[in-house]
Amino acid sequence: MYKVPVSGTIAHSWITSFDSEYEAFLAYAKAYPNACTLLVDTYDVLTSGLPNAIKVAKDFLIPNGYKLQAIRIDSGDLAKLSKEARKLLDEEGLADTKICVSNGLDEKTIRSLLNQEAPIDFFGVGDNIVLPSEAKVGVVYKNVALQKNGSKEFISKIKASNDEAKAITPGYKKVYRFYNKENNLALGDVLAFHDEIIPQDTFTLIDPVNEINQTTIENYSVRELQVPIFENGKLVYKDPNIFNKKDYCDKEIKTLPTEIKRLEKPQKYFVDMTKELIRKKRELLLSAKNQGISLTKKL
């Protein structure tokens, strides 16, 4: 509309929609052989993403007269990873493949990377141009589960990362809130797979960051927090007016314990995960970290 050229690279959601990172890279290379920039940090830059990108370059791009234009790194220690990536690319004969980095960059971070002599060819700068520094709110689309070929079964997907906030929790989930029956105050929330049965008599809340931190609760009621917004592509939710939203927020805040609402050293309100969800996340993270190791050994 505004005659502004659009450019971009492969998305994490594209990569996790395939059974393997290599398949995702190869499909992208075949679709955009003249402008192939591969995002290499969906699982692990050095043991998976980079080896798979190099393999696609050698299996498809170079034999067909193309080249791997660039790789992009979007998380972790950008200086260290770019140096190690440059070394491996050069060793594999891909000295003309450029390195792009992103991940909430600002002028201070870019200056630091340049001062560290990080071998970066260009920077992907977005959030910190359009958002003021006091509005650090990010929303990023990631796949957590897929249904394939009309199947009713959900296949859990994960995006691994050295940045804790970027490592997603896999699976089609539901969110539940527990309330103390005696005073109707919230006890905590839990993420569960959509088909898990939440017991009504006793439950153990497990901190996903520190599994030793557990609390067993009793005499509670349970409420599912999510409501449908879209079903089969159709909007099924009626957006409340601003006054109803205010009333809803006021009502919900009253259910939070005083210890959580205090200004000085408030207690943390935990959104925990069920044992099964923790187990599955750990399993998929391990699988993601290992998926490129055999490729690394071959290289």
Image (cartoon, grey):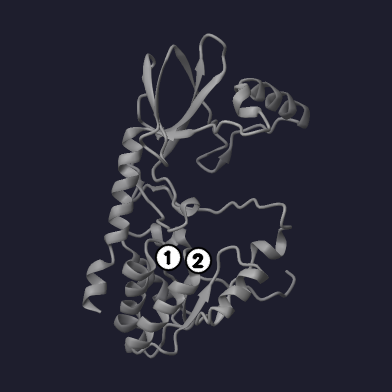
User: Is residue 176 among the parts visible in the rendering?
Assistant: no
Placement of 68 over or under 279, stated as above or below: below
Residue beneath the point at 37% across and 51% down: 157
Q: Do the residues labelled 1 and 2 touch (CB within 8 Å)?
A: yes
Q: Would you call the spot at circle 1 few (<14 residues within 10 Å), some (14-19), or many (20 or more)?
A: many
Residue at mark 1:
41
Q: What residue type is labelled 1?
A: Asp
- State the residue lying farthest toward the top: 182
Residue at mark 2:
74
Q: Residue 22 carries which label?
A: none
Residue beneath the point at 50% across and 26% down: 188
Secondary element at tag 1? loop
Q: In this view, does 127 lie to the left or right of 53?
A: right
Q: What separation in Å lies between label 1 and label 2 (alpha carbons)?
A: 6 Å
Q: In this view, does 36 lie to the left or right of 19?
A: right
Q: Would you call the spot at circle 2 few (<14 residues within 10 Å), some (14-19), or many (20 or more)?
A: many
Is tag 1's residue or tag 2's residue first in the polypeptide sequence?
1
Residue 196 vs residue 32, the one in the foreground: 196
Residue 129 vs residue 112, the one in the foreground: 112
Placement of 223 over or under 87, stated as above or below: above
Secondary element at tag 2? loop
Quadrant containing the C terminus is bottom left
User: Is residue 50 among the parts visible in the rendering?
Assistant: yes
